[in-house]
Amino acid sequence: MRSMTGWITSALLCAAAATASAAGEEAAIAIGAVVSESGAHAASAAEYRKGLERWEEQINAAGGLLGRRVELRLKDDGSEAVRAGEAYAELIRDGAQVLIGPYGSAATLTAAAEAERNRRVLLNAAGPSNEVHKRALQYVFQTLPPYAAYADGVLWAAREAGVESLYIAARDDAASRDMAEAAQKQARALRFGSVTLEVYSGRTDNFLPLLYHAMKVNADGWLAFGEARDAAEMVKILKKEGYVPKVVYARAALEPRFIKLIGQDAEFILGAKEYDPRFSTAGNAEFVKAFTAKWSAPPGPLAAAGYTAGVVLAAGVRRAGSVEPQKLRAALATLQVDTLLGPYRVDPASGVQIGMKPVLLQIVKGRAQPVWPEAFAAERSLVPFEPWAERKILE
């Protein structure tokens, strides 16, 4: 029969082991995120999740944060924005100390409200709508370029080209309207002579009336925020009518479908990208290599967005020396750090991203080349938009 001393010793050892195990679990920094694993957004959100998981693997391989392992805890909102808030509430109740936002602006709005209510820091990694940070947020920090940032590069190009009158066409969807309205507001602040904004239906297949409106205001800059099909049809009309602005920009101009639809008529047109595996941003080469090795495909913008949120979070935690919400929010409000998506810097009053800007590229000889910001352009400069009749066939 086991002696009383032996029994007590065994019990104490078991209790110590249980306590150590519990302490190990408590030592992990729990990061909560809602990612659509079912429903309409599941395919897109899968890429976002891969970026988050790649960051979790990397940070733990390097020893974690503050000497503690990072544990990513995920919940599914079924691609329904109204469910995101409750999902974050559950994550908080289950011990998530910091939050990373869901996929999509609508879900992010709901998540932001929950984060503010619980005074828990949330990294807005996939909610680019200008509506998210329209009111001052104390605990929500944007880690990707907002839709408003798409105006910066093209307005730089318009000024470089000597544009005086801008015509802005926007598809009637939330993202396109956000971008176009920001472009209109900034263009007026920059004192362009005339700035006209027209919103067109997604069912529009005849863009000639839009061209007539642009001609009426003598627009020498054409900006289009919409889909690749829309932009292609617009370019066809411009060519058919012999209309030659100083600048032609289409947000979707860099999509393969755009060039496929109009071929060499895509020459000299400007487009924008928030991320590309070939960009020489901080840590991008290593990220692309590791991501491709794991998933046998290069990362896209959503993967980069998920990973970037983790990078910013880690930098903020290290600066704060804590995951305590007040200390962490103070650190993130003034933090500046280079990322895959550009320099992280926010407006301290609202948490909106002001450092990251989509790269402006121009199609020249069939290839998209960066022309802005200067760090990406290198020795390249904006190429003037050539009249249709003077163009040579590319070999």
Image: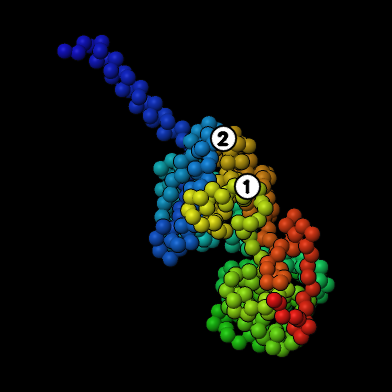
Residue 76, quarter of the rendered image: bottom left
Above-or-below relation of 287 to 77: above
Residue 95, quarter of the rendered image: top left
Residue position marked by numbered label 1 in the rendering:
283
Instruction: Please name the amino acid that badge 2 sits on.
Output: Ser
Instruction: Please name the amino acid that badge 1 sits on.
Output: Gly
Q: Are marks 1 and 2 in contact (CB under 8 Å)?
A: no
Task: Tell me residue 129's x, y (percent).
Answer: 59, 62
Tell me which residue sits at (55%, 79%) in the image. Answer: 202
Crowding around mark 1 (Cα neighbors within 10 Å: few <14, some 14 to 19, many 20+) is: few
Q: Is residue 32 visible?
A: yes
Quadrant, the C terminus:
bottom right
Using residue 130 as the reference point, say whether residue 36 is left or right of it: left
Q: Residue furthest front?
A: 395
Tell me which residue sits at (62%, 59%) in the image. Answer: 276
Using residue 198 as the reference point, say whether residue 46 is left or right of it: left
Above-or-below relation of 232 to 60: below
Q: Nearer the viewer, residue 112 or 360?
A: 360
| Element type at mark 2 | loop
Q: Residue furthest right?
A: 162
Q: Is residue 139 visible?
A: no
Tell me which residue sits at (74%, 87%) in the image. Answer: 242
Quadrant, the N terminus:
top left
Residue position marked by numbered label 2 in the rendering:
322
| Element type at mark 1 | loop
For discs 1 and 2, the disc positioned in front in the rendered view: 1
Q: Nearer the viewer, residue 336 or 289?
A: 289
Q: CA distance from mark 1 to mark 2?
A: 24 Å
Tell me which residue sits at (67%, 45%) in the image. Answer: 337
Task: Tell me residue 77's x, y (percent).
Answer: 42, 57
Q: Nearer the viewer, residue 264 or 204?
A: 264
Work out whether mark 1 precedes mark 2 in sequence or the reverse, and give the earlier one.
1
